[in-house]
Every structure is written in C-alpha cells, then in structure tokens.
Image (cartoon, rainbow, N blue to C red):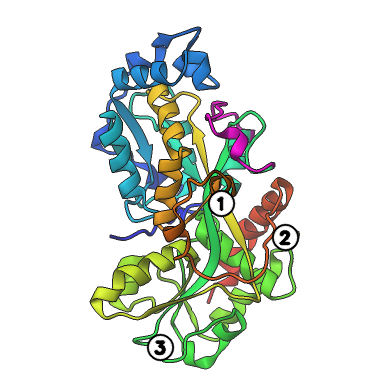
Amino acid sequence: MTPSRTRAAALTGVLVAAALAVSACGSSTSKTTAAGSTSGTKSAATATSAADLGGMDALVAAAKKEGTLNAITLPRDWANYGAIMDGFTKKYGIKINDENPEGSSQDEINAVTTTKNQGRAPDVLDLGGAFALSGAQQGLFAPYKVATFSSIPTGQAAADGSWTFDYGGYVSIGCNQTKVPNCPKTFADLLKPEYKGMVALNGDPTQAGAAFAGVYAAALANGGSLDNIQPGLDFFTKLKKAGNFNPVQAKQSTVESGETPITIDWDYLNAGYAAEFKAKNINWQVNVPTDGLYANYYNQAINKWAPHPAAARLWEEYLYSAEGQNLFLSGFARPVEMDAMKTAGTLDTAAAAKLPAVTGTPTFPTQAQITKAKATLASGWAKAIAG
C-alpha cells in the first residue's frame, strides 16, 4: 500500500512523457468498437447526460456491453479508491484496468494526448486542479453532467461538466511521533533544527497536486497569497538550507519505514496512515497547520476520445452517487456533495466524525491564480531546492 501518487496528483512537472509507458492491460492500439455504440438519441461518446442515452438503465446496459473501464493513476489506498473500484465492478460487472497507479496528473494528460483513438487510452481521469484546467483548455475532455450535478456547489465544476470537483482535503503535517517526540504543528515549526532531514513532500510540485498544494500552503503561511506562491518557494529554499528538507517522495512505504518521518500531504492521506499504523505500533500524528490553511479538490473528467464512453459516464455517475461519495468519505476525503448529502440525510455521519479537525475556512484559487502559480513553480522549484 503506497499512495504516492506523484500526482499526489494535482500538479507537478518533470516525469512527463517517459513516465507514461502504458502497460500490458491496455497495450492494444486498435480502436474499440464500443465507442460507436448507441442507445437512445445520442451515441455514448457524445452524451452529455444519462438522459441523452435514454436514462440510467440505458446507460448501464451500454456500459455493461462495453464491459471494461480504463482508469489511470488510481492507487488503491488513495482516498479509498480500492473500495470504490471494487464496488463499481461488483455493482455493474465491469472490469477496471488501472494503468500507472503511482503516476501523476501530468502523466494522465500525457496518456490522453499520446494514446488518442487507441483502445488502451484512459476513459476517465482524476486530476489536480491545475491539470484539470489545462486539460480543459486543450479540449481534451468530454462534457458530461452527472445526475447529481445540481448538488455540486457553484464554481466547483465547469459549466458544461467537462471537469467536476469530486473529493478534497486540507494540506496537513503528518508526523511519526514514535520517532519524533515533539511533532510540528505549523509551517514555522518545520524550520526547527530538531527536524533535520525529516520534512518531505508527496512528489514534485511541478507534477503532483499534493506537493503543489504543500507549496501553496507554505506561501499562505509566509506572507504569500493565492496570487503569490513565491513565498512558498522561498520557504522551501530556507528548509533546504536548514538541512530539514527531505527530497524523498513521501508515501505510505516511506512513512512506515521511517524514511520520511514528517510529511506535508493531504489530510486524508495522512489520516489514512494514522488508521493503518495503529496496529503496527506507529503513532502517526496529523495536524492541519493554522498558519497555512489550504484546501482543494481533485477533479473528475472523461477523455474526449474514451474507448469505453458508456462505462466512463457510468463511472462518473457512480462516483457522484451517495454510495460513491460516502466511499470517498470513508477514506477520510471530503466529498464535494457533502453539504447536500447532510441535508438529504444520506451522509455517513460516523465517517464524517473521523475527519481531521480544522479551524478556519479556506478559499480556493481561481483558474488564473493556479496558472500563475504553476508558471512560478515551473521556473523556480528546481532552484529553490538546489544545492
């Protein structure tokens, strides 16, 4: 179990093309015949809602006929994706090929562009915010609105449904108190000499969303803003000069081995470690830093050239159903429909009660802010941690 998701999935950038060698489960380069299947008034490939295919029953039938879903970069222990994939397959009998599970959001974009019109191409994508926006700008996604689209808060989905927030969390500081007696609770704490060589990110912030979020949170903790991520880069320069920055990509295996005793990562991943490690006598503490409160969501999108377009759309319907949203919640991630589900009485309140405590209300960066931050990181990250 190693939810590295260099993607830590939302934003980083140096693994690019080479990391995307799509493996055996999708190695065929032939087009799938299912992509042209029709039901109702539209083909699955052009359906913008289940109604376009004649309703959910027709969508389910078309998806079952295809029989396969090509997913990409979904570690089984990331936000409870193992249980989610198993639940989808059990419910619909559709096999899931999960390609490159330890990859990044950039890898996913690369997969769409390099396998266009091929049977091995990904059907669906789970992307960090910056990558969802850039992919939409490139015209890579198919517009689709799930049945519960109206339950998604304003601004948390593209107007046409080409990308939609799905689950999210807060940047947190995880710490192995078994090895670190006094765990840090703020970004300011991380500069203390006692944490030499201990502080790691989940990936490269130019490629991975979790790491990108970590730098953004550091910026907010050090006089920056959603318009100015530079103080976050400056913070990591200081962390590197102090000898505290650990360049190893944090994931469950490195946390468990003690290689990365302190991690800056999404709270749902750190909370998952804490639950997993109890039986192993590892006391993993999780703190959402008050001096750098940053939260964001990952995004769902359908490949415009999905080889299994009906299965892709059914997958989205499953994720945004009460069942799918509660499965994210069981993995300590906050589902985008959480407020609507509270009102409807469909929220798993026991799972919600286990979420890490948070003080304050975060704001979310706009498309322009993310684009600017991404450009700043692309030009400055390597320099920030050089030496």
| Rendering coords of residue 176 (x, y %) | 38, 81
| Rendering coords of residue 83 (x, y %) | 31, 48
Q: Determine whether label 1 and label 2 are within 8 Å by CB.
A: no
Mark closer to the chain start, 2 or 3:
3
The answer to whether residue 53 is above or below residue 141 is: above
- Cα–Cα gap, marks 3 and 1: 30 Å
Q: Main secondary structure of the magenta part?
A: loop
| Rendering coords of residue 51 (x, y %) | 52, 17
Which residue in the structure is indicated by mark 2? 226
| Rendering coords of residue 111 (x, y %) | 43, 36
Q: Residues within 10 Å of mark 2 (few under 14, many from 20)?
A: some
Q: Secondary structure at mark 1?
A: strand
Which residue: 47% across, 52% down?
A: 9
Question: On the image, which quarter does residue 138 sit in?
Answer: top right
Q: Is residue 89 left or right of residue 306?
A: left
Residue interval drawn in magenta: 137-154
- Cα–Cα gap, marks 2 and 3: 32 Å
**Viewer can see residue 132:** yes
Q: Nearer the viewer, mark 1 or mark 2?
A: 1
Which residue in the structure is indicated by mark 3? 180
Question: On the image, which quarter does residue 314 sit in?
Answer: top left
Q: Nearer the viewer, residue 306 or 376?
A: 306
Q: Amino acid at mark 1?
A: Tyr
Q: Residues within 10 Å of mark 1 (few under 14, many from 20)?
A: many
Which residue in the structure is indicated by mark 1? 297
- Cα–Cα gap, marks 1 and 2: 15 Å
**Viewer can see residue 5:** no
Q: Nearer the viewer, residue 283 or 188?
A: 283
